[in-house]
Image (tube, rainbow, N blue to C red):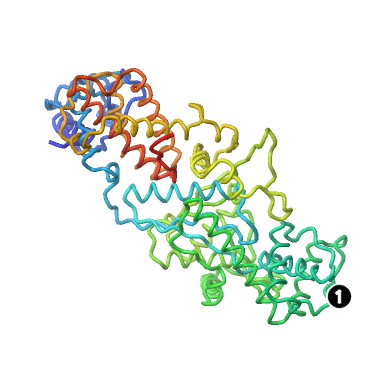
Amino acid sequence: MSADPKTLLADLLRQALKSVAPDHVDTPIVLERPKQASHGDFSSNLALQLAKPMRRSPRDLAALLMAELPASPQVAKVEVAGAGFINFTLASDAKTSVVQAVLSQGERFGRGAATGTKVQIEFVSANPTGPLHVGHGRGAAYGASLASVMDFAGHTVAREYYVNDAGRQMDILALSTWLRYLANFDIVVPFPPNAYQGSYVIDMGGEIRNAHGDRFAKVTAEQVLAGVCSVEADKEDHLDGLIANAKRLLGEDYAWIHDFALTEQLGDCREDLEGFGVPFDKWFSEKSLFDTGLVERAVTALEKQGHIYMQDGAKWFRSSTFGDEKDRVVQRENGLYTYFASDIAYHLNKYERGFDRIIDIWGADHHGYIPRVRGAIAALGLPVEKFEVALVQFAVLYRNGQKAAMSTRSGEFVTLRDLRKDVGNDACRFFYVLRKSDQHLDFDLDLAKSQSNENPVYYIQYAHARICSVLAQWNGVERDLLEVDLSRLDGERELALCARLAAFAEVIQSASADYAPHQVAFYLKDLAGEFHSWYNAERMLVDDEALMMARLALAAAVRQVLVSGLALLGVSAPTSM
């Protein structure tokens, strides 16, 4: 007999199915937890599935299946409900057995069996051109939580950050840094409005001055501006002209400025994410795609398959053939590859590394980019079904009722570091995953910092601290809780708590399959709510020792699942508050 009630019920239904519908024994058996407790602990729609192929009333089939169900001491009641659902109510000992399972398995409780599936999740991947802002924070929290949930569900997960260390944005950062550096020597070039404006660029210019003096200042403002069109004529051409002059005037030293700015900002990004509890297994360099010739190889492969054509001196990928709104340039007339070309090469690299599932987490504003990437993957002859994109809406931060701007180019942004300092990592991590990733999120700072039941982080952590306090007052040996008589847990609230604990593994699998770590957050809120309700209604440290031990065992089991669930979301579980 299975120790897992859900597996047991599926086995019972399968046996009944052999008697009632032997030609349909392979019908999938689905068991779900009803939203209303009055409908039992599990419900199956098996009769509704069979109704059409068997040309029978669902309720009649449900009654037949119920009549053929083998008896089980773990099942207290079976009934037909609604249009033909079969509802099961478990016996009390079947419900309370989860307590012993949690206590004996500890942090392994709820973990799925190894699937052998290799999953790569690429997330954040912000250009290293400035500090991470609160918009990046949501992608970081979502990606880290999803990776942890999928790992816990049984998959082998690789967490990856794609470093855009090649291309125009890095050139703009290098130019911005150099111009701020030159200002220290009274070489004043009007700062372009579309360069990076933040104070961090001024700081980097000061660091270069302090370390290298005027080594990179052997120029005049006139030389820097020579041949460059005015900002008023075309601000982007103006910026590109300044970059070209910087490369010419600095020569080999330009690479030093470029690499210094990259190292500084990437280092800041790493430090910020590590402090946020967001680890990565690999930081993948875009530049390496060019150095290894993979970009050229990817474009050549598309060309050989007839998916590239020439127009106006540039190479175009026929992405419209694969559902994109128009074709895309992969190599410009000047011979330089586009960002899209390196993205194609990067995804080719992912496939060549042998991942079974490739998940990209992008900002919702990149939705239109999906068809062209999918199209390139298909054009390369790779299985498109392995590639998936999860979209993340940017979070909007409200401080004192005012919406905060977050543009790294304008310099007016609230950094992730500032937000973490303001409300703490726990509130940041939890609030970021309180909604589906593709739903709009307003980040309420006042609520995140409040110590009230309305603050879900405080509410959940307080449940954990309460349990720790009770167990400390008991001052017993916790391993003794493994041997207690759980039959004393017969109250409505206690059995509801047991049912909630038993659902943990199901929530993990669902959150993993749906790419929805917010399901874990909702689960923890419900678990904490049911614990607080029980705690407020019943005393734990009662004179009846058998009852006390049973209640303490249940509380300890709740504590363990709270710890496990919070850890998946990157949130701590304080022992006192």
Picture layout, residue 512 above or below residue 184 = above
Report x, y in % for residue 360.
50, 54
Which amino acid, by three-letter code, is at mark 1?
A: Ala
Q: Is residue 24 visible?
A: no
In percent of the image, x 59 and y 34: which residue is there? 444
In percent of the image, x 21 and y 25: which residue is there? 90
Count of marks, rendered view: 1
Q: Can residue 60 be seen in this view?
A: yes
Which SS class for mark 1?
Answer: loop
Quadrant assignment, res 463: top left
Q: Nearer the viewer, residue 164 or 69?
A: 164
In percent of the image, x 22 and y 24: which residue is there? 548
Quadrant that contains the N terminus: top left
Q: Nearer the viewer, residue 375 or 334?
A: 334
Q: Residue furthest bottom?
A: 252
Report x, y in % for residue 193.
80, 58
Q: Is residue 450 left or right of residue 176?
A: left
Report x, y in % for residue 307.
56, 67
Return the residue at label 1: 226
Quadrant that contains the C terminus: top left
Quadrant assignment, res 355: bottom left
Picture layout, residue 112 above or below residue 234 = above
Quadrant assignment, res 565: top left
Picture layout, residue 150 above or below residue 65 = below
Report x, y in % for residue 105.
23, 43
- Label 1 Cα crowd, 10 Å radius (few <14 / some 14-19 / many 20+): few
Q: Is residue 429 left or right of residue 81?
A: right
Q: Nearer the viewer, residue 365 or 430?
A: 430
Q: Is residue 91 left or right of residue 324?
A: left
